[in-house]
Amino acid sequence: MDSTTPDNGHCPPGGDDPTSSSSSAASTAGAAPRGTADKQPRASVAPLSRYESQKRRDWNTFLQYLQNQRPPLALAGCGGSHVIEFLRYLDQFGKTKVHAPGCAFFGCPNPPAPCPCPLRQAWGSLDALIGRLRAAYEESGGKPETNPFAARAVRFYLREVRDSQAKARGIRYEKKKRKRTPPSAGGGAGEHSSTASVLVGGGGGSGSSLPEGSTTAPPGSSSIS
């Protein structure tokens, strides 16, 4: 009987087992170099911008304020009046001197001496805060039509704060004029305008919107029209 492979299944002396060779080659080809798995690139998370970080802190502070109420107030039951109460609560952390009508420095932008008038949140800080909270509310699933930070009562309150502080501090708040740019050559006509209210002659106020600090809102986010 002619046979190339012994009946016992062993390879002839000095020969290579073809099955063993192919298995070894396959395992060698499929094996990844040592340490390759550890060096796989990991998806990096982009850090939040300063505005986004401040918005998150403001939102968490407002939610904590609601929880501290007696009884605790749910976000779904929050209205414009609750937002105004929150803004008044923040006045205790303000850093802007607002002179009372009976103060000798009422209407003086640069008082020559200190006075006992209280510190308040600057209007610019409150206006920027409301803009951030209004955006955070809708980003958290709230509907624009039920947004308490966009309530008419809140807009009126901010307008009163702006006017009263302007008189007490002897400064003026004005709006930037709209600036129109001519249409581009490619036909993409666009209008760049800024309607954010700015402080004339005195900066945006030194008060921070929250105890841990505040940043200004992006251009065009003024809560008062």
Image (tube, rainbow, N blue to C red):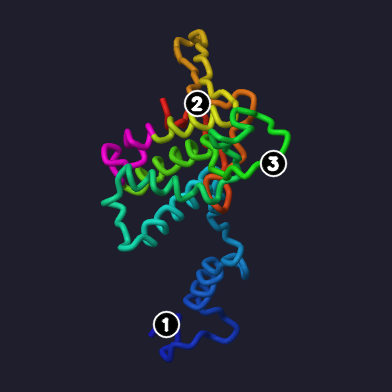
* Residue named by callout 3: 114
The answer to which of marks 3 and 1 sits earlier in the sequence is: 1
Direction from residue 218 to residue 105 in the image, left or right: right
Name the main secondary structure of what is drawn in magenta.
helix
Q: Helix, strand or loop at disc 2?
A: loop
Quadrant containing the N terminus in the rendered view: bottom left
Residue sitting farthest toward the bottom: 8
Q: Helix, strand or loop at disc 1?
A: loop
Q: Helix, strand or loop at disc 3?
A: loop
- Residue 89 percent coordinates (x, y): 45, 50
* Residue named by callout 1: 3
Quadrant containing the C terminus in the rendered view: top left
Q: Which of label 3 and label 1 is nearer to you?
A: 3
Amino acid beneath label 3? Pro
Q: Residues within 10 Å of mark 2 (few under 14, many from 20)?
A: some
Amino acid beneath label 2? Ala
The answer to which of marks 1 and 2 sits earlier in the sequence is: 1
Q: Please state the extent of the stretch shown in magenta in the rendering.
A: 142-156
* Residue named by callout 2: 196
The answer to which of marks 3 and 2 sits earlier in the sequence is: 3
